[in-house]
Image: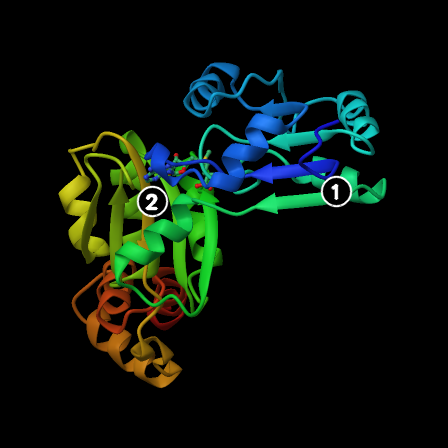
Amino acid sequence: MSERLPPGLHIVATPIGNLGDLSPRAADTLRFADRILVEDTRVTAKLLQHVGAKVPMTRYDDHSSAGERERIVAELGDRVIALVSDAGTPLISDPGYKLVRAARAAGHAVHTLPGPSAAVAALTLAGLPTDRFLFLGFLPAKAKARSDAIAEVAGVRATLVLYESGPRLGGTLAALAEELGSRDAAVVREISKMHEECVTGTLAELAIRYADAAPKGEIVVVVGPPAEVEAATDEALDAALREALLTLSPSRAAADVAQRLSLPRKRAYARALELAK
Ligand code: SAM
């Protein structure tokens, strides 16, 4: 057992781009742990080399078998086991929660070494309200499931934070614009790396910008909360829809009104269908 650290599970946040963001305490824990649980040994090997750590690594994720988890938990009473992910804070869209739960259930100590996480870092760059935010992780890949997931949170009065990849960014922004209407948003890319950037605009503007231009690198999308006008009354919605329905189909009328009143398109469409009857 390490002389310097208490036994138990140590959750260690690691840099999301800039190695200088590894805290001294995190570096010490990686050096003096008895074993490090990792997602990918090749990725973590570079970090260990950076801090001069020569500690055995074991692959671990939430799909690891219950038996494997039990073997790890059995060591926690007298050994220092560190858990890292490829980058950022373990458990945040990364493996670990089952292990933390199992360690606690067995009465072992769980320590955390807080540090970088792309979601929080993106919030600090986006310039959108941070008093309430909802982290959505990765949205589903399939279009219908993705739209449903967005519709589910359309009424939540909080800034939304989600992880995305370059090739899927355009489609996700278009789906967000369609379901959420006009909201301020930010595409935050390559945080703490050489090409860090934060592009802001409305969801519609960003959807157009990235429609045919998949950016490279790692991405967080931040979407501001619904505007106050979203509290538009049923009467205001009906009045706007009735007028729009004079010239437009229910679907077009709903899209138009939802955009103008900053309402979820689904709510406007359901009402447009009723009014069109
Ligand atoms: N646990 C990590 C954390 O705390 O941020 C997140 C792991 S998740 C599997 C990886 C996703 O995080 C990437 O696909 C990207 O959306 C986001 N991400 C990670 N590093 C990033 C960076 N440097 N800039 C922007 N987004 C990043």
**Mark 2 within 8 Å of ligand 1, using the beta carbon:** yes
Ligand 1 shows up in the quarter that is top left
**Residue 270, image x, y percentages:** 41, 64
Indicate the position of residue 257 as horizontal and vertical percent values.
Answer: 25, 69
**Quadrant of the rendered image containing residue 220:** top left
Tag 2: amino acid: Val
Residue drawn at (68%, 30%) of the image: 81
User: Residue, x 48% and y 17% (percent of image)?
Assistant: 45
For discs 1 and 2, the disc positioned in front in the rendered view: 1
Q: Position of residue 262 (x, y in %)?
A: 28, 69
Which SS class for mark 2?
A: strand
Q: Which residue is disc 2 drawn over?
A: 220
Seen at 85% across and 44% down, the residue is 107
Q: Quadrant of the C terminus?
A: bottom left
Identity of the amino acid at label 1? Arg
As rendered, which of 167 and 94 lies closer to the eye?
Answer: 94
- Left or right of residue 160, residue 256 in this image: left
| Other-residue count near label 1 (Cα within 10 Å), few / some / many at <14 / 14–19 / ≥20 | few
Can residue 268 be seen at all in this image of the molecule?
yes
Name the residue rendered at 67%, 35% in the picture. 4
Q: Is residue 68 left or right of residue 263?
A: right
Residue placed furthest toward the front = 3
